[in-house]
């Protein structure tokens, strides 16, 4: 019977470890989806906001045919319109909408790029210094541009449908998996004989999954540069795509590494709690054995004398039992 319990505990341990490992990966992905400010900080840290005016200027029709003085004025107006603080606020708002959509909190992708507001900011800035004829021409050109660019129009319909379908199932699957994991964890306690044993088995699952996550992130961190270089990512017009991708990957590894350390910490807490409970029970058992009700207490010299057995022979006055003499049994017989 004990062998069967040990086998069941080993099977449960493997399932718990696998479930925790998958759960840690899912938690890392979910955390990266929620961390919208992190991506905005990556864009700001790699100078994308400062490079954006040059990209917009290069995209303007006939921008290369303008005089150098007007190009300088247009670029200055673009830098004023594309103020880093304004850009940061717009990017964060778009990222929040995308995060809500990916998590299934929003049924449709509502984020859009405010082209109309950007156009008005640019024209207002350039009209103060630019040539009136060029200002008029730019007004006519930009007036034909849409006021907004919805991101939903840039996403393939099949991809949008897949995200909407799987994001709705993600929560249900996660809750079901967590319920199964908790049931298996609870089963460890009766199979292992109570709290200390069950806590050790569950703690071992946390420890193995945490160490596995830490080992995976350590290996991925070593191979990170080579892996990203293998995708052939470069850059364009001052935008360091490879460096930004590396920063995002390192952020994801940092999140996963933190989750691994937390898992190991939970294992340590369970081990310490199990050891404390086991030592407490041992001390109580030892105290009970040495107390009045224990074996040593029954021979206490200060206690009352044991009364003779009512059904047994009474001792003689001299301290000897006279039953043999009375029965007629002599030493030589």
Image (cartoon, helix red, strand yellow):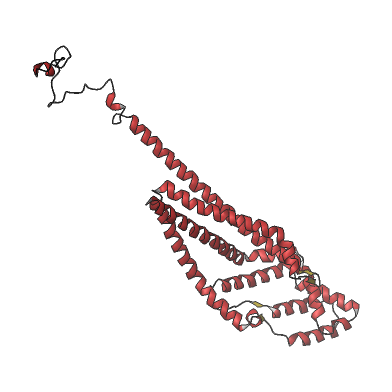
The residue that appears at 43% across and 48% down in the rendered structure is 197
In the picture, measured across the screen, residue 331 lies left or right of residue 179, that is left
Tell me if residue 54 comes above or below residue 256 in the rendering.
Answer: below
The residue that appears at 63% across and 55% down in the rendered structure is 215
Q: Position of residue 220 (x, y in %)?
A: 67, 60
Residue 41 in view in this figure: no
**Looking at the image, which is closer to me, 254 or 202?**
202
Residue 38: image quadrant is bottom right
Q: Quadrant of the C terminus?
A: top left
Q: Position of residue 255 (x, y in %)?
A: 62, 59
**Looking at the image, which is closer to me, 262 or 322?**
322
Q: Residue furthest top?
A: 318
- Count how many numbered circles sit on residues in the image: 0
Residue 228: image quadrant is bottom right
In the picture, measured across the screen, residue 224 lies left or right of residue 74, that is left
Residue 235 in view in this figure: yes
The residue that appears at 43% across and 52% down in the rendered structure is 6
Tell me if residue 313 comes above or below residue 63 in the rendering.
Answer: above
**Looking at the image, which is closer to me, 38 or 281?**
281
């Amino acid at each position: 019977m004990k062998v069967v319990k040990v086998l069941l505990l080993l099977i449960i341990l493997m399932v718990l470890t696998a479930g925790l490992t998958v759960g840690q990966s899912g938690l890392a992905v979910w955390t990266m989806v929620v961390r919208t400010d992190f991506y905005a900080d990556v864009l700001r840290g790699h100078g994308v906001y400062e490079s954006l005016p040059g990209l917009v200027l290069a995209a303007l029709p006939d921008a290369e045919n303008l005089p150098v003085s007007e190009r300088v004025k247009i670029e200055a107006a673009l830098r004023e319109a594309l103020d880093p603080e304004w850009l940061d606020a717009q990017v964060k708002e778009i990222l929040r909408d995308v995060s809500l959509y990916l998590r299934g909190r929003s049924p449709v992708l509502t984020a859009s790029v405010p082209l109309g507001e950007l156009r008005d900011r640019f024209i207002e800035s350039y009209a103060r210094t630019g040539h009136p004829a060029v200002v008029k021409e730019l007004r006519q050109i930009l007036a034909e541009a849409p006021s907004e660019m919805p991101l939903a129009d840039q996403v393939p319909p099949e991809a949008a449908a897949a995200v909407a379908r799987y994001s709705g199932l993600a929560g249900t699957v996660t809750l079901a998996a967590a319920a199964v994991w908790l049931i298996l964890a609870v089963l460890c306690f009766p199979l292992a004989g109570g709290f200390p044993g069950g806590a050790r088995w569950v703690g071992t699952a946390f420890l193995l999954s945490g160490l596995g996550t830490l080992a995976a992130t350590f290996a991925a961190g070593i191979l990170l540069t080579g892996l990203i270089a293998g995708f052939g990512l470069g850059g364009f017009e001052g935008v360091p795509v490879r460096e930004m991708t590396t920063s995002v990957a390192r952020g994801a590894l940092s999140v996963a590494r933190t989750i691994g350390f937390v898992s190991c910490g939970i294992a340590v807490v369970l081990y310490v709690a199990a050891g404390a409970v086991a030592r407490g029970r041992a001390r109580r058992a030892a105290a009970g054995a040495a107390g009045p009700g224990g074996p040593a207490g029954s021979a206490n010299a200060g206690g009352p004398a044991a009364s003779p057995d009512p059904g047994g022979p009474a001792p003689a006055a001299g301290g000897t039992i006279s039953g043999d003499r009375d029965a007629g049994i002599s030493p030589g017989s």
